[in-house]
């Protein structure tokens, strides 16, 4: 699973329930709860109230966790996994992924 948002985390938890060996790769170490984020600018919530730490979710639901930005999927590495699921939202605008991509050029 690449991406630690609603889609990636929900899929990881669900697949673990079916006894799959699941690894979630996320550039962030937290799941961001976007619907709560609207309250941050007006001071009704802090940033920490709108995030769930992925290490806690992985410990509870027992999926493997890698905190890093995915910058490519190579055929060789892909063979390590039976299936690779991309849940990185519509676009990967992550500065950390972009920075890594830039360093490769
Ligand atoms: C202000 C706001 C309010 C919202 N309110 C609602 C609501 O009330 N109800 C509702 O149903 N929906 C709501 N949404 C929409 C909802 O948040 C999105 O539909 C949902 O977050 C999409 O989930 P996702 O997992 O596909 O993507 P995301 O939540 O965007 O998760 C993608 C994850 O992939 C990670 N990622 C990206 N690129 C890489 C990479 N290269 N390597 C590793 N990781 C990567 C990102 O860091 C991120 O953690 C709201 C959205 C916003 C912005």
Image (cartoon, rainbow, N blue to C red):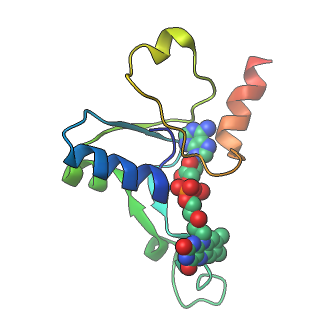
Hey, which residue is sitting farthest top in the picture?
76
Ligand 1: which quarter? Answer: bottom right
| Image position, residue 43 (x, y; %) | 59, 89
| Image position, residue 71 (x, y; %) | 63, 28
Question: Which picture quadrant has residue 100?
Answer: top right
| Image position, residue 70 (x, y; %) | 57, 31
**75 relative to 20, above or below:** above
**33 relative to 105, above or below:** below
Say which residue appears at 57% left-offset and 35% top-offset.
Answer: 69
Q: In this view, does 97 lie to the left or right of 78?
A: right
Hey, which residue is sitting farthest front in the picture?
18
Say which residue appears at 27% left-offset and 42% top-offset.
Answer: 63
Say which residue appears at 62% left-offset and 24% top-offset.
Answer: 72
Using the image as rendered, state which of residue 44 and residue 15 is in the foreground: 15
**87 relative to 73, above or below:** below
**43 relative to 95, above or below:** below
Question: Which picture quadrant has residue 30?
Answer: bottom left
Q: Quadrant of the N terminus?
A: top left
Q: Is residue 77 left or right of residue 93?
A: left
Q: Is residue 49 left or right of residue 17?
A: right
Q: In which quarter of the image is the C terminus?
A: top right
């Amino acid at each position: 699973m690449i991406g630690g948002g609603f889609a990636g985390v929900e899929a990881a938890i669900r697949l673990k329930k079916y006894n799959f060996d699941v690894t979630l790769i996320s550039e962030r170490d937290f799941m961001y709860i976007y619907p709560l984020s609207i309250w941050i600018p007006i001071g009704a919530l802090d940033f920490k109230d709108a995030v769930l730490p992925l290490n806690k979710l992985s410990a509870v639901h027992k999926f493997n966790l890698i905190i890093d930005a995915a910058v490519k999927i190579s055929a060789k590495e892909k063979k390590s996994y039976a299936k690779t699921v991309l849940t990185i939202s519509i676009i990967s605008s992550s500065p950390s992924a972009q920075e890594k991509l830039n360093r490769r050029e």
